[in-house]
Image (cartoon, grey):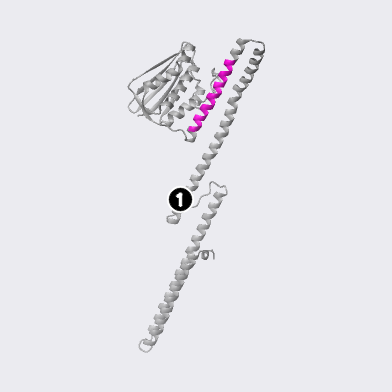
Amino acid sequence: MRVLANRKIKALLLQILLCISGFWLLSALLAGWAFLRVREAEPGVMPAVIGISACAFLTGAAVLVFCCRYFRQQDRIMEEAVASILAFISGDRNARIECDEEGELYRLFHEVNSLAAILNAKVEKEEKSKEFLQNTISDISHQLKTPLAALNIYNGIIQTAAENMEAATVWEFTALSEQELDRIETLVQNLLKITKFDAGFMVIEKKTENIADMMAEVKGYFSFRADGEGKEIVISGDDSLSLLCDRSWIEEAVGNLLKNALDHMQAGESVRIEWKQSASTVCIAVKDNGSGICPEDLHHVFKRFYRSRFSKDKQGIGLGLPLAKAVVEAHGGVIEVDSRLGVGTVFNMYFLI
């Protein structure tokens, strides 16, 4: 019997058997003593004593049989549990141990099932991470092809112009080469930042910061570009309003939204950065009166590398808005977008007070 392979169960059954044997032997001795004492005075006592001894023996035997049966059932349950665990190890992620009854053993089975569920979740997360890495590498290679091809062309033109002593052409295509190099640098930096957020390595150090000061600093970053392109940046809001945040990351998020607005505006148009406080939130909004976003693109603007087929922006790489979303969510906030073609776009960032 497989149940007797366990030395503790074997010892328990042996102890039960010894107790039964001892009880039966004691009963036999008592029966013999009773027989000697009462065979002449009360002839009917001896059969009763023998009957009691027999009942005691049968009761002990029944207890032993029931114990063996119980342990065999437990052994079968354990074998089924082991088979389920081996199936899970072999790759069957849906393998589980039946644990629809009460008791410590089934509690153990429930915990094993919980462990299997946790392992499945981790495996799925690893698979998603692997898929994300593959997609990211594919996206990077695709995004780098355009600027690298442009650089090769520009360098060829520069070399030809230099041989012909065409200084104006050299300067023109040197500037274009610098733009493509800046584009590559921005791509790599934004990818590194987003990847750190995904991996949980990015540290958010929150302090109470004055929003007006932060927005003025963001405006300063883009004032030269806006002036050169004939566009206007306006900031407005309560000068005393503050926010518990990581200043550099909030400025990064707002800066990305502002850059996105400038990319889709024409000369003479303006973008506004506004902030206000409600009962439970602080809202920072970036509003422009530019070209707007097509309705079919509105639900995809926060996807990485997403570029609308209607977009006139040839320099964007599709990472600024996803990075802004990651920053806002890292602060426990949410970001929303509303846009109308030919009217403009509004990005609202909400942070809990």
Quarter the C terminus occupies: top left
Camera-side residue of 205 and 272: 205
Residue 48 inside the magenta-drawn segment: no
Seen at 45% across and 56% down, the residue is: 105
Where is residue 219 drawn, in percent x and y? 42, 18
Camera-side residue of 270 and 308: 270
Seen at 39% across and 85% down, the residue is: 35
Seen at 56% across and 34% down, the residue is: 133
Q: Is residue 144 above or below residue 21?
A: above
Q: Is residue 280 above or below residue 272?
A: below
Q: Provide the residue designation for mark 1.
A: 111
Left or right: 351 in relation to 196: left
Residue 305 seen by the camera = no
Seen at 47% across and 53% down, the residue is: 109
Where is residue 116 drawn, in percent x and y? 50, 47
Magenta highlight: main SS: helix
The span picked out in magenta is 174-196
Quarter the N terminus occupies: bottom right
Left or right: 145 in relation to 247: right
- Secondary structure of the residue carrying tag 1 is helix
Q: Quadrant of residue 185?
A: top right
Around disc 1, counting alpha carbons within 10 Å, would you say few (fewer than 14), some (14 to 19), or many (20 or more)? few
Q: Quadrant of residue 138?
A: top right
Where is residue 332 drawn, in percent x and y? 40, 31
As shown in the figure, which amino acid type bears the numbered disc 1? Glu
